[in-house]
């Protein structure tokens, strides 16, 4: 199967309310890997049209250089979803994020509409990526089929706040209620070879809690995490950036692999631990995340 996992970093995606000009203007200066310009739940119903206009202007006139720019539109079946797509798709942000997708029928209708709009503007179909949010129990049940529906979908994410509401849970900081969904969503993403983002951590003042959650979701296999405040960037970026120790170990493994390969040896030991192809693959990923070229080690 074609490898769709991105090679660039997607550790932190900063949500910015689409009706807040100051935040929208400054969004890329804080060091997040991406910005999520939000037309959906950060925007009150009576601000939806104003936010759409503002975000359209920002996409045209603000430089988000160095940041991946994603716009979260409203659900297709709300009074705002179709108009969001009509105004945003022609501007071709790096990606659009589709909230609360539950079925293949929905994703197929949305992608059809996106491509109709692109056709009308003589735009290609392979430039703007699509990110799908899974935020309901039904979405979790259908996640693999949704994620696998189109090669334009290059990431899926869990919306923990909405999922907790749909599941009628009291959401706790330990995330127990959404743990099954997190794992199911990660597995679907890995099966489709696409990226997978974790949900926001709403307790902005709780830095230790955020670090713990980021460390946990990294272990589960998430690519990165949506965040809501600039103060959360450094912590999550740090968790998702390999440490010096991890880099040294990975370099040692890759170097040993290269040496052994020449002699036809596929399995060997480094510091008393067995190394074979999957271990080398993981070491290469560590170097990639640390921006280290294998040729330079
Ligand atoms: C369940 C969901 O759908 S989540 C996704 C939708 N939610 C959002 O988009 C919320 C985004 N975040 C925010 O609105 C805010 O960070 C809040 C409400 C969570 C906290 O607000 P505050 O306590 O006022 O933030 P704080 O005091 O840390 O702000 C410090 C600075 O960072 C800026 N800032 C805060 N959040 C953001 C953000 N998300 N994007 C860009 N800038 C931001 C503020 O404008 C402020 O700038 P200034 O110093 O130049 O005035
Ligand atoms: O986690 C996110 O991306 C925010 C969200 O929409 C949710 O939690 O419901
Ligand atoms: Mg949500």
Image: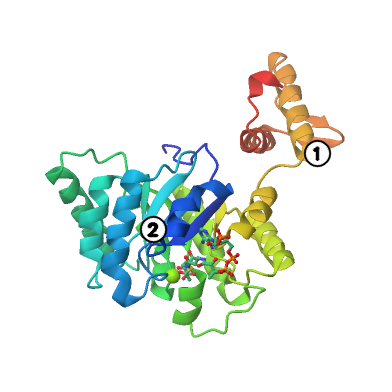
Query: Which numbered circle lies on residue 132?
Result: 2
Q: Classify mark 1 as within 8 Å of ligand 2 or not, answering yes or no.
A: no
Q: Quarter-wise, where is residue 106 in the image?
A: bottom left
Assess disc 2: are there few (<14), some (14-19) or many (≥20) residues with their C-alpha within 10 Å of its C-alpha.
Answer: many
Q: Residue furthest left?
A: 120
Query: Which numbered circle lies on residue 10?
Result: none
Q: Nearer the viewer, residue 100 or 262?
A: 100
Please identify the quadrant where the N terminus is shown: top left
Say whether residue 59 is left or right of residue 1: left
Vertical side of 47 occupied by 13: above or below: above
Q: Is the residue under label 1 in contact with that under label 2 (CB below 8 Å)?
A: no
Residue 218 drawn at (x, y percent) = 64, 54
| Disc with the residue nearer the chain's start (2 vs 1) | 2
Say whether residue 163 is left or right of residue 113: right
Q: Nearer the viewer, residue 152 or 207?
A: 207
Find numbered disc 1 in the image and state the secondary structure of the residue it sits on. Answer: helix
The Cα–Cα distance between marks 2 and 1, rounded to whole angstroms, is 35 Å
Residue at 58% across, 46% down: 31
Q: Quarter-wise, where is residue 215 in the image?
A: bottom right
Say whether residue 78 is left or right of residue 224: left
Residue at image mark 1? 245
Please identify the quadrant where the C terminus is shown: top right
Find numbered disc 2 in the image and state the secondary structure of the residue it sits on. Answer: strand
Residue at 64% across, 49% down: 237
Residue 65 drawn at (x, y percent) = 46, 39
- Coloring scheme of the render? rainbow
- Residue 182 in sight from this viewpoint: yes
Residue 105 drawn at (x, y percent) = 25, 64
Q: Classify mark 2 as within 8 Å of ligand 2 or not, answering yes or no.
A: no
Residue 202 drawn at (x, y percent) = 58, 71
Assess disc 1: are there few (<14), some (14-19) or many (≥20) residues with their C-alpha within 10 Å of its C-alpha.
Answer: few
């Amino acid at each position: 199967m074609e490898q769709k996992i991105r090679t660039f970093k997607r550790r932190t995606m900063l949500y910015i309310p689409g009706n807040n000009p100051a935040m929208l203007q400054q969004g890329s200066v804080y060091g997040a890997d991406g910005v999520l310009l939000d037309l959906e739940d950060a925007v009150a119903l009576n601000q939806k049209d104003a936010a759409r206009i503002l975000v359209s202007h920002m996409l045209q006139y603000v430089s988000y250089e160095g940041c991946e720019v994603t716009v979260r539109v409203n659900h297709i079946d709300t009074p705002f979803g179709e108009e969001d797509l009509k105004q945003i798709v022609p501007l071709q942000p790096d990606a659009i994020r589709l909230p609360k997708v539950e079925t293949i029928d929905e994703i197929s209708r949305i992608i059809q509409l996106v491509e109709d709009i692109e056709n009308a503007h003589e735009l290609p179909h392979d430039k703007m990526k699509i990110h799908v949010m899974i935020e309901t129990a039904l979405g979790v049940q259908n996640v693999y089929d949704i994620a696998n529906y189109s090669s334009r979908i290059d990431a899926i994410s869990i919306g923990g706040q909405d999922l907790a509401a749909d599941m009628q849970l009291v959401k706790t900081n330990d995330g127990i209620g959404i743990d099954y969904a997190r794992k199911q969503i990660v597995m679907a993403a890995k099966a489709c070879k696409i990226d997978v983002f974790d949900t926001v951590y709403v307790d902005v003042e709780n830095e230790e809690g955020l670090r713990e959650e980021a460390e946990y979701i990294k272990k589960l296999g998430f690519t990165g995490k949506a965040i809501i405040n600039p103060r959360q960037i450094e912590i999550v970026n740090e968790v998702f950036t390999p440490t010096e120790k991890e880099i040294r170990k990975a370099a040692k493994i890759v170097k040993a692999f290269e040496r052994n390969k020449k002699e036809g040896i596929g399995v060997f030991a480094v510091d008393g631990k067995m190394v074979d192809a999957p271990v080398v693959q993981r070491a290469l990923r560590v170097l990639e995340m640390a921006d280290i070229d294998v040729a330079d080690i």
